[in-house]
Amino acid sequence: MRKLELHWQILIGMLLGILFGFAMTQVTWGIDFVSDWIQPLGTIFVKLLKLIAIPLILASLVKGISDLKDISKFKNIGLRTIGTYIVTTVVAITIGLLLVNVIKPGNGISEETVTKLTDTYAGDAGVTSKLEEASRQKESGPLQFLVDMVPDNAFSAMSDNALMLQVIFFAIILAISMLLIGEKSAKPLKDFFDSLNDVVLKMVDLIMLTAPYAVFALLAGVVVSSSDPDLLLALLKYAGVVVLGLFLMIVFYSIVVTAYTKKNPFWFLKEMSPAQLLAFSTSSSAATLPVTMERVEEHIGVDKEVSSFVLPVGATINMDGTSLYQGVAAVFISQALGFDLTFSGQLTIILTALLASIGSAAVPGAGMVMLVIVLESIGFPSDKLAIGLALIFAVDRPLDMCRTIVNVTGDAMVSMVVAKSVGKLGDPHVEEWDDHLDQVKGS
């Protein structure tokens, strides 16, 4: 019997996890059982992905840049990457603003629902922590993101996944320096990073063997910890606008893939589906990064010279799905609470959401911090910020899962576009976890 492809295995695991989670909410001991015995399996899987994220970024980026014979190619790749990411982010925010202004989901929220949501979530630890983090970020200077990008200790940066930009900075400086000392002097170090890259990619293959079981555990945990169903239904129109916008972004990516790279968009989405499903399950672009890189390089055919730079940078600064959500959420909150939002205010949302996405961490919940910054930029009353966050907090986690899919898909699309523009988009070369197993098996 033919083995099911990975994306089908993961999808089945997700569906079973959702059904199992709902079933467990119907028995008195079910929620505790899932929290104690099922959810930890998903947590271990996410930790394993995060474990290899920094070594993978370091090894692949150093290998990719040090393989370049012409250092000017790196400048071309860098400029095209940043430029394309800015364009896709502006497109995402614009789509979100157009939809929320046409559909007006905030006009359908009753005073009773606002009061109930406020009473339930305004004092929630999750809301207050986001307000505190946004306040800390706002107090920093305009060039603080550049200061934060430069590490004062490379080993300290590599010990914290939140400092991914610092690792990228160090890897770029190291790789460029290797090019400048000449091929002969750099060869021992280059051989080390080449080997490290192969080992970490093999670790990705091994970890992915557990993916179907891990997403089962993750989704079951999400379901049993979900909010009041009545409150979720009250916010259905708002959530629908966000999901529609995210769907239109996937359509936009597909059009770009077809028009520029001449690849079949359905093939592109199929090859990226394991990474998309993991992005949905983990709500983290950073945790999904090792899988995204493996799919883009081996299954789509993007050269490592391109993917090793474009994807780590994208996981950190490119958050199309999150930026779209900023626009929808800011206008929705303004509509629901009667705050008059002018056209210039909406232009401010585009600029602020673009800048906020660059400095935001690729972790679950970062979008809420960005949203506070966006709301403050349009003059939203500070005493109502907690109420505004409370309005959307109930559906933030499921929407976070959905927008992470768009973030990851956008990164993959940009890597294809940049690779095509520099002649580095080739044929797929899939490697399996057991390709070299015969070399280590006894007779």
Image: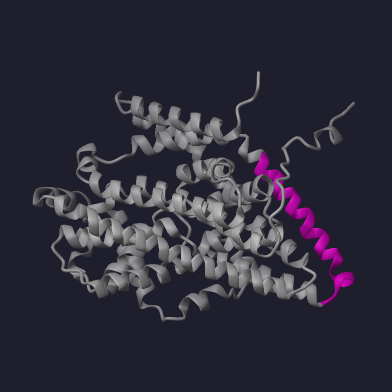
Position of 228 relative to 83 (above/below): above
Residue 77, quarter of picture: bottom right
Residue 160, quarter of picture: bottom right
Quarter in which the N terminus is drawn:
top right
Position of 109 relative to 341 (above/below): above
Q: Which residue is depicted at the point 78% across and 57% down? A: 194
Q: Position of residue 225 (x, y in %)?
A: 33, 39
Position of 87 relative to 54 (above/below): below
Judge whether residue 59 can be spotted in this image.
no
Q: Which residue is depicted at the point 27% across and 41% down? A: 227
Chief secondary structure of the magenta span?
A: helix
Residue 196 falls inside the magenta stretch? yes
Q: Position of residue 163 (x, y in %)?
A: 54, 65
Q: Position of residue 365 (x, y in %)?
A: 39, 55
Q: Position of residue 79 (x, y in %)?
A: 59, 73
Q: Which residue is depicted at the point 55% across and 55% down? A: 259
Judge whether residue 344 can be spotted in this image.
yes
Between residues 70 and 103, which one lies in front from this camera angle?
A: 103
Between residues 76 and 190, which one lies in front from this camera angle?
A: 76
Q: Which residues are magenta?
A: 181-205
Judge left or right: residue 278 versus residue 104.
right
Q: How is the image coloured?
A: one colour
